[in-house]
Amino acid sequence: MYVSRMLDDGTMLGSSRPFGLGYWPLPEDEPGVAVQREPVRLVSPDGGLVRGVLWTPPAGQPWKTAVILSHPRGDFSVHYACPLLAAAGYAVLGFGTRYMNNDTDCLHEACITDVKTAHDEMVRRGAEAVVLLGNSGGGSLMAMANAELGIGDGWVGVAAHPGEGVFMLQVIDPSVTDEDDPFSTDPELDMYHPDNGWRPWPEPSSYDPAWVERYREAQRARVERIDAVAKQSIADSMSVIPDLKAVDKSSDPTGYRELRRRAVFTKYLTIYRTLADPAYLDLSIDPDDRALGSLFAFPDPFDANYGRGGLARTMTARGWLSTWSGLSSNAKLADTMPQVKVPTLLIHPTADTEIRVWQAKEIVDAAGADDATYIEMPGALHYLEGDRPEAMQHVADWLGARYP
């Protein structure tokens, strides 16, 4: 559930959709047939726990192609795609990685190991083809798994953004001047300042294009500053390892203790204000079918930017660099899609408040596959409420034309 608070003037504060619930099946997503479900528990080679649900067609109906889907931190075992694609004749393994519901130390390099574990399990169960399905942040995860590990016979993206770090580059608040002070602000870079074009909800805001360009540059600069802190922390830890190896812990236990704690130390980053994309409040920026506001704040992103909302609010140094840094993360579709040579499908809902049409087209254009298909769903939302059966029918038709 979510918590909200009302001020004396009737203003609602703190409303936000809890992450994950948007992916759960709704009554209108009922496939109309009795698909089968089986809990699955797997352990990756390095000890990571992979838990999910295997959805299969109704009893007596064989399957030959498996679809696997996950997200760096989301529980996709109950994703709406699972029952709908199982009803269409496919085995569907929705699962969570070892970082499910907690990406504080999320390493995409470990996540893709979990994806391979799920992939290999479906091969063991007899799948003649395994297709990787990535929804939202799962898109860059699945593309990275294919590009780096060579697994998967197809890649499907549904409302997939260019990468969690790339997404952070467009939503992080660049007006923060002191990472230790959540209220520190450079007013010239504050999208929530009236002098820059902001107007209180529900009025639309209007930002000058030249100002937006400076704003985007400042977002990149803030990420660079956070990256520098994270990298320095890791370098400091690594720098003492030679001395740690050389010290005799029996004769110098105090020195050993000091070096050891510095070698294993990991800095935690508190990252304030990560919900500040001017396009949320100015629909003239990258126009499409979206409404005012953000997926992660209802309805006004101002509250979530300063309150409980946003993403990547507490991260380890390595977790930030691997997952949320658009400059350092390896999970960027611009880098991985050219290596994805398997048949590719991207479905983009044009009313998505987080992903722009040009970004979706750029993902498909970057694909290394000769067989690449792009489908727009006009007016559909990020979670595809009301449009899920149609979207999954597109996926099923695409699968049926290519796989057993």
Image (cartoon, rainbow, N blue to C red):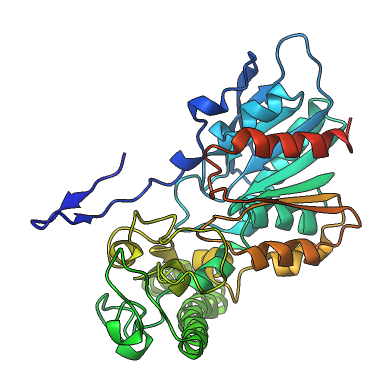
Figure label count: 0
Give the farthest residue toward the left: 8
User: Residue at (72%, 58%) from the top-left corner?
Assistant: 144
Q: In this orientation, which residue lies closer to the viewer: 13 or 316?
A: 13
Where does residue 378 sit, x and y in percent of width and height?
A: 62, 51
Residue 39 appearing in the image: yes
Residue 152 appearing in the image: no
Q: Indicate the quadrant containing the N terminus: top left, top right, bottom left or bottom right.
A: top left
Q: Quadrant of residue 38?
A: top right
Q: In this orientation, which residue lies closer to the viewer: 86 or 46?
A: 86
User: Residue at (61%, 63%) from the top-left corner?
Assistant: 163
Where does residue 104 sit, x and y in percent of width and height?
A: 44, 58
Q: Quadrant of residue 372?
A: bottom right
Where does residue 245 sit, x and y in percent of width and height?
A: 56, 72
Judged left or right of residue 320, residue 63 is: right
In the rendered image of this protein, does residue 7 appear above or below residue 210?
A: above
Q: In this orientation, which residue lies closer to the viewer: 93 or 156?
A: 156
Q: Indicate the quadrant containing the C terminus: top left, top right, bottom left or bottom right.
A: top right
Judged left or right of residue 18, residue 195 is: left
User: Residue at (57%, 59%) from the top-left corner?
Assistant: 107
User: Residue at (81%, 32%) from the top-left corner?
Assistant: 123
Judged left or right of residue 270, residue 325 is: right
In the rendered image of this protein, does residue 44 appear above or below residue 183?
A: above
